[in-house]
Image (cartoon, rainbow, N blue to C red):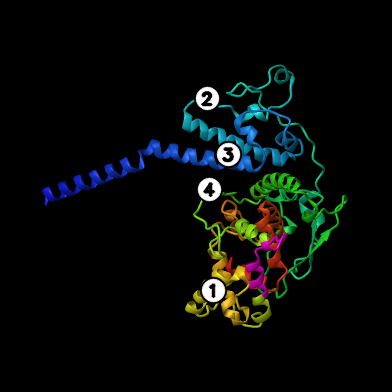
Amino acid sequence: MSLERDSMEDYWSEMKSIDEERQGGPEEQMERVSVDEAELEEAWLQEAGLSTLATGTQSDGPAEALLSTLTHSQAAMVKKRLDNYTQTLRKRNRQPMRHVRDVFSMSDASSELTPPISPNGQIAPKLPQWNPPKVPPACAADTNGSSSASETILLSFDVPYSEAARAHRKGRECQDCRRIRKDDRDLPSFQIVRPRQGVTRVSDLSSEDIKKIGYISLIELTTFYDFMGIEMKRNRVVRSKARDSGIFGVPLTTLLENDQKKYPGSRVPLVFKKLLSKLEQTGLQTEGILRVPGSASRVKHLRQELELKFYEDRFDWDRVRQNDAAGLLKMFIRELPYPLLTQQHLPAFTAAQSISSPKHQIQALHLLIMLLPEANRDTLKVCSSHHALKRFLKIM
């Protein structure tokens, strides 16, 4: 028995040694984690329009202009992300790296004489000082104070969401954080308070303006989630195999390019609009239309016909039943090579479900939608114009 036990211990010891060789030792694993964190933080800085902070370069480009508009809370969040980025790089490189204090240094006499220098010899950009507007205490002016979920909740855009959510961090009671009770029959209604400087619609903005709004939306969302006590996680964008023709398994942008060859100006995939329209015409009165599956063989056959006949205008939509439209719609969404809510922001969308306050949920979703690519945002928008959205969102 002793020899047998010794043999088994030797066996498991050898197996452990093999696993460590395959996966790398503890130091190598820690280094890999550091590299992963650095890559995610670098991606965040790049998407926030602040990639020059990571490279150590300085220019009069969008990063410097963006930094001059940040509130103190937003600037603190950028500092936190940049600090994490430099710390993970230190773990990987085992050598001194530019510290975040070099970027966010306070303006004093010594710093003006000797500005911080990055490892590549460039002068690191400094955060301009900016005084944010005074914020009303603890979200007091944005709601009627009633605990009834059926009454109107006011949405104001005059103050950044993160500034109004400071009560979470300070531990004070926030009137916007009331929960929806299970016995409430009516969902709350929202009323937008007209901002002092008016409202600008997304459709009125150029693509360059939308890009700049995406920068500030990401910074504001990260700051807002931090005040709400929610970790802002991001998925790494992984390229997946995608088709360049057909209907299913084709990226939204490719579908739009193919649609625009025949119908210039298309902003939403035509097959997606057609399926939603068919579902709205025939299936809204059917209980469990998106929950109860139809005939799998029938949906499979219709899918094959759609692939072959849709762009030739030979597909017979009269043959599509209500359950068929629901099945094809779910199949179309599930087989997109990249999620409709995007791969990198999917965790943030999921985290929004954990916010108990309906007002804060709306604010988080507002910022998230501004981060979506144009094709994804337009596709979600066409959903909101259909009554089928109320049931459709439950399968997203």
Q: Quadrant of the C terminus?
A: bottom right
**Residue type of the residue flagged with mark 2:** Pro
Taking the image as shown, residue 317 lies to the left or right of residue 145, namely left
* Residue in the foreground of this view, choosing between 165 and 347: 347
User: Badges 1 and 2: C-beta atoms under 8 Å apart?
Assistant: no
Q: Nearer the viewer, mark 2 or mark 3?
A: 3
Q: Which mark is residue 305?
A: 1
Quarter of the image where one finds residue 67: top right
Position of 156 relative to 47 (above/below) = below
Q: Which mark is residue 236?
A: 4
> Within 10 Å of the Cα at label 3, are there few (<14), some (14-19), or many (20+) other Cα atoms?
many
The reply to whether the magenta stretch includes residue 266 is: yes
Residue range highlighted in magenta: 262-277
Taking the image as shown, residue 308 lies to the left or right of residue 130, namely left
Quarter of the image where one finds residue 152: bottom right
The residue labelled by disc 3 is 42
| Disc 1 to disc 4, C-alpha distance | 35 Å
User: Badges 1 and 3: C-beta atoms under 8 Å apart?
Assistant: no
**Residue displayed at 55% across by 74% down:** 327
